[in-house]
Image (spheres, rainbow, N blue to C red):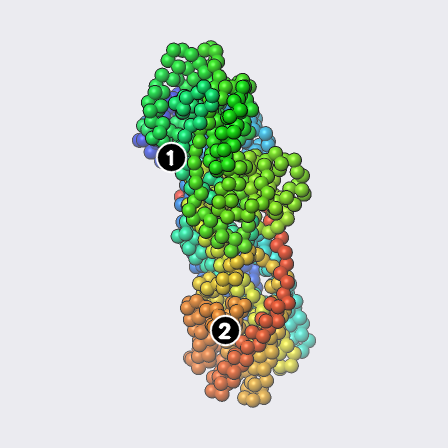
Amino acid sequence: MSAASLPADDVLRALDVVAGEGLGGEEVLRRQARFGPNAVASHRARVFPVLWHQLRSPLLGLLAAAAVVSFLVGERSDAVIIGLIVSASVGLGFVNEYRAERAAEALHSQIRHQTVALRDGRAVLVDVTALVPGDLVELRLGDVVPADLRLTSVTGLQCDESVLTGESLPVDKSLAAVAAGTPLAELSGCALMGTVVRTGAARGVVVATGARTEFGKIAAGLDTHPLDTEFQVGLRRFSMLLVYVAGALTTSIFVINVALHKPIIDALLFSLAIAVGITPQLLPAVVSTSLAAGSRRMSRRKVLVKRLVCIEDLGDVDVLFTDKTGTLTTGRIEYARAVPVDGQRVETVVRWGLLGTENQTRDGQDIGGNPLDQALWRSPATAGERAALDGYTQVAVLPFDHERRMVSVLLRDGDGGSSMVTKGAPETVLDRCVDVPPGARDALAAEFSAGNRVVAVATRTVSSATRDVGPEDERGLTLAGLLVFIDPPKPDAAAALRRLSGLGIAVKVVTGDNAAVAAKVCHDLGLPDRRVMTGAEVDALDDAQLADAIDGTTVFARVSPEAKARIVHAQRLSRGGVAFLGDGVNDALALHAADVGISVDSATDVAKDAADVILLEKDLDVLADGVGEGRRIFANTIKYVLMGTSSNFGNMASAAGASLFLSFLPMLPSQILLNNLLYDSSQLAIPTDNVDEEQLRKPSHWDIAFIRRFMFSFGPLSSVFDFATFGVMLWVFHSGPAQFRTGWFVESLATQTLVIFAIRTRRIPFFRSHPSLPLTLAALGVVMIGAVLPATALAHTLGFQPLPKAFFATLVGMIVAYLALIEVGKRLFYGAAVTAAPTPGHYAVRRHLRRRAAHFSTADAVVRDSAKRPSS
């Protein structure tokens, strides 16, 4: 604010920087050491926060209380066992969550944001986190302002400052100083970190970085817990289901045992153990392991996610809106030819096209700029005209924006004459021209029907006294001709579209290009020849009509940024997961509106900021890989949930039933906890499991009603064999309490662990669906440990007793019968199951600010307190 009240030259002097030179390399290093990284957040995997996340569990508090109570009442061995089991559970959860945090940190370090800065007199691309006070920064359309800047030159600059002020209209910027004490929303001479360049261009000097910026102060004080994704919402709803079931079971079991005059302490400990037993304690560890492993696989496939939990949301996508350039086409735009109008020459059209540009070059290399301009400048066909431009001087530029869809440049030639060149979308430019030859529109239609990109070039002579150009000057133009560019379809795009269709994803194209061009490309790639809607047609519909029209439309052309967001929003209200793939500033609103925003590493900063997923290659095959991986991770997570809830529910219901007719507890609390720990440990291999192809063909989402039906359907099947075990132990082997508990411990561990092979697939296990080797070894290994444990030296300490050999023969028969019964149950259950419709996604408004804060982050520690560093 103090810089805003001073003239720009005074600010430059105070920061010891030369206007046309910027900072030198050594000075930059000194200032980086002094001020630290230009970041407001740090993405580091920290040991103690992860450990605290494990320790703060209310369930863990109950277990700790149970251990203390056991110790005080003299059951010291139980107390030690409970303590060891709790420690093992915390350790497993900590190791897996910390690995996931490290994976997130590694992913974050690969997402880079760069800006153009002037250093040692040269324009160079630098990482935004490397900026220091005194750096001179160039701003262009679509840039996210990388630091607090005092503007030193401005060309029609407007910034969207809604992220800071809440004001939706863009703010005009100028060089004038403001009075001291001017409110934040009125600092017209400054561009503030986190705001977005809506129109124009500018240069400014950095006056504050990181947490010392206005944005940094807000982000640092913000509740930085990221908003939940749809996957996390489903996980929370599932957890609440377990809370209700566990509460009902434990309360009833405690009341029943007390009513049967069993010791209150034993009844309490047993009830607490039941609560633990029905809860999939290692679900967070399984999810973390799945996400960490999935993120590594996705990274190898060139897909980066800003948050690991977004991987599952990617798997829930069933509609993809995408732009055309670089996705369906090669993205390597090449200049083809110039089409002059009556009386013009090809060379003249090319010359005006080269001169009418925002593109900047340094030592023959492009620094930013429009892709079409870059293609024109690098084409060998224009080399002769490029050599003849020395006599022209660029006086002023009215930059391109997505409302005008044009750029205008004021030029002075060597003789002192002045002219204005306007270049842009043909429909827009032709509307501002006079006396357009009839053949021009016919030539334009022919190029569009061939699927070519076309730019119209027009000129107007202006007074030599003119020093500036504005939108009102873009009238009375004379059409010079058309510049034709080619961007052919990708050779593998058709195959990628078929692959997405096989994944149950409908692809729709949303583009700013001409409708005929977009329709031609889509037809050539095999997309359905459905309706093509223009932006004007979209604007004429209300939201309900638009939602109805989307299903029958494949191409949306010449649409504004606001219309793109409306299309995405309307689709979300009518169907499941919606993704938007875009890389330009005009895509930012739609990226925010989608369930999953997808951008590319080469995208504009504002697009990468708005996205959840970053593709290192703009390729639909890469996206299909990401979708498949998301569905694979979700499928393996659901395997654990279905298996754990059903078998645990059955075992705990069996325990409740057994306590009604037994004079002793059917299993000691420490034995229940040990059983649960061994069982859960074997399931940590689930993330490695293979997934059936049919599970990848449709979107994946949480269905709590389905999980509840599964639990109540298959849980009782487990109880059938538990009660059969009770009968065998009591009436065949005439077992006492210790042997009874041992037999049930071994049987329940074997059945609930091995049932994963049946529940993991809807096919016939082993014959038509093969589990992964790690899962097979883990499950068989845990069953072996449970069978051997009663014969070891630990048996007495754990309350076990050796089992007769005949028991194991009976056990094998019960396991085979149990798995066969599960197969029959699967056929009946899946034949009658009805999957609930997906719930439309939702995101809160503050998601924008939190995403923007992630843009200005680093893998290094960040000092948030500005008092700890010298101020500028």
Q: In this rendered view, identify the residue nearer to me: 368 or 372.
A: 372
- Residue 643 lies, in percent from the top left, at 54, 68
| Disc 1/disc 2 C-alpha distance (Å) | 55 Å
Q: Is residue 704 above or below residue 623?
A: below
**Quadrant assignment, res 831:** bottom right
122 sits to left or right of 627: left
Residue shown at 50% from the left, 33% from the top: 446
Q: Earlier in the sequence, mark 1 or mark 2?
A: 1
- Image quadrant in which you'd find residue 152: top left
Residue type at tag 1: Val
Report the residue marked by disc 1.
Answer: 126
Residue drawn at x 59%, y 29% as measured from the top left: 169
Q: Which mark is residue 754?
A: 2
Q: Where residue 79 sits in the image (x, y, percent)?
A: 51, 70
Q: Residue at x 47, y 19 (%)?
A: 459
Q: Residue at x 52, y 79 (%)?
A: 815
Above or below, comparing residue 628 to residue 195 in the picture: below
Residue 738 as seen in the image, left or right of residue 712: left
